[in-house]
Amino acid sequence: MSEWPQEPPAALWRELSRERFSAPALVGDRISDVAVIGAGISGLCTALELARRGRSVTVLEAATVGAGASGRANGQVISALTRHGPEAIVEALGERFLRLLSGAADRLFDLVRRHDIDCDAVQAGWLQPAHSPGRLRRVQGLARQWAQAGVPAAALDAPEMAARLGTSVYPGGWENSQGGHINPYAFTLGLARAATGAGVVVHEQSPALRLTRSASGWQVDTPEGRVLARKVVLATAAHTGDLWPGLRRSIVPVTSYQAATAPLGARGAAILPQGHAFSDTRFDLHYMRKDRDGRLVSGGALAVQALAGRRLPARVRQRIADTFPDLGAIDVPYFWAGRIAMTVDRLPHLHRTPDGLVTWIGCNGRGLALACAMAEVVADAVCDVPDAELALAPVPVPRVPFHPIVSRTARLILPWYRWCDSRDVAAG
């Protein structure tokens, strides 16, 4: 059974969303070429792509569209991975995956334009400022690698970065002008609207309870119905249950908390004046973007989750004060959370079985653009494209050693990450 979120709702994104979507629960039987389990960005983009290829698709959502991680993200659109630059990506996953990733942000914004999705999309660029001179040297090298890969990337010195951020606390970094930010909840609802317009059938409040082989392929049971399909796509990410035995033991689900200020008005005019989003080079990541009303939206992780609704906004308030010291006192009234699927190697993994199960998993905090790009790969896998021709080669499902312990204690590495970040600053 797939799991669905119990975290605080992303009230800000819902409040700002002009997109609306609802669908009935599944009652009775449906027959489709493909059943997609999970109506987040990954599942809906895949359904859209399969419908474009002439397949009939039924999407089952355990809760409501946008209730999972897709609707709870910070909303940054990034065509990069967290730990791997282009050379490391090619070594690990190949040239075709690098090309796919390089165009991931453009693919998301193309979907926005093609389907007229009202999600406050801003493609002004994404910045990675370096928090120390040592990290600056690394990201300047990354900028060169991305530029050589054909991406509109450039290294930025301290004055150039300060002009884009509205603060001089960083010694420089790099920019990918393809990136940007969206309201991720509105984007997910817009994808659902587009998918139904393309003939996809979506059912909310229809958790997949069992997945079994049938004479014609697969049977997916829900509380009041079932789907019979030749192929099944699992798009459940960090909420993956036991439908595919062993899959959830291949990832570590991590809770990512988000918080937002009240609208800053004229005080915030000098902050991110060109509309960029940024995520810096810390292991304990500092990241921010603005929404359409001038709120700063940021977030982070906590080693101890007790009183998260009080402690995380306080941490965000302090980070904003440290980054923009001239801003003055601010309120941080919005707080929410979602779960990210992390892999041990920090790389996405594609899995498929000979009898028609397909999934990819491991967004590692960069899921918005990547999910849009991976839809083509998953659709290729569903359509029986050979392994050697896929942009991401399928691999066996790995198992995280001591998974029950690791999945509950992984966040306790945060103090070590923060110490490493502080040492890097001191050494720089």
Image (cartoon, rainbow, N blue to C red):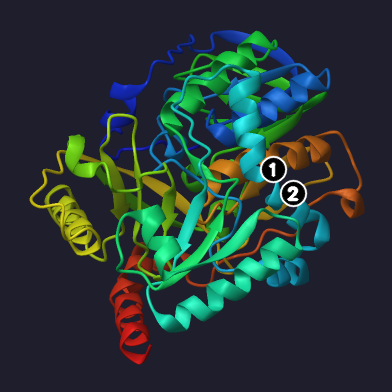
Q: Is residue 419 visible?
A: yes
Q: Identify residue for label 2.
A: 100
The disc at residue 308 is: none
Residue 21 position, x and y percent, is 46, 13
Name the residue nearer the viewer: 79 or 347: 79
Residue at 19% from the left image edge and 37% from the top image edge? 266
Question: Could you tell me which quadrant the C terminus lies in?
Answer: bottom left
Q: In this view, does 386 lie to the left or right of 121?
A: right
Residue 371 position, x and y percent, is 61, 41
User: Marks 2 and 1: in contact by CB < 8 Å?
Assistant: yes
For marks 1 and 2 on the same chain, the one whose residue lies earlier in the sequence = 2
Q: Is residue 261 left or right of residue 362?
A: left
Q: What element carries label 2?
A: helix
Residue occupying the far bottom of the picture? 427
Residue 37 position, x and y percent, is 59, 30
The residue under label 1 is which amino acid type? Met
Task: In the rendered view, tell whether residue 167 sits above or below residue 376.
Answer: below
Q: Identify residue for label 1.
A: 374
Exactly how many numbered labels are in the figure? 2
Task: In the rendered view, tell whether residue 48 sits above or below residue 143.
Answer: above
Residue at 30% from the left image edge and 33% from the top image edge? 10
Q: In this view, does 164 lie to the left or right of 262?
A: right
Q: For marks 1 and 2, give the CA distance.
A: 8 Å
Name the residue nearer the viewer: 54 or 286: 286
Residue at 54% from the left image edge and 39% from the top image edge? 236
Q: What element carries label 1?
A: helix
Q: Is residue 218 left or right of residue 197?
A: right
Q: Nearer the viewer, mark 1 or mark 2?
A: 2
Local crowd at mark 1 within 10 Å, few (<14), some, or many (≥20)?
A: many
Residue occupying the far left of the picture? 329
The residue under label 2 is which amino acid type? Leu
- Using the rendered view, name the quadrant where residue 291 is placed: top left
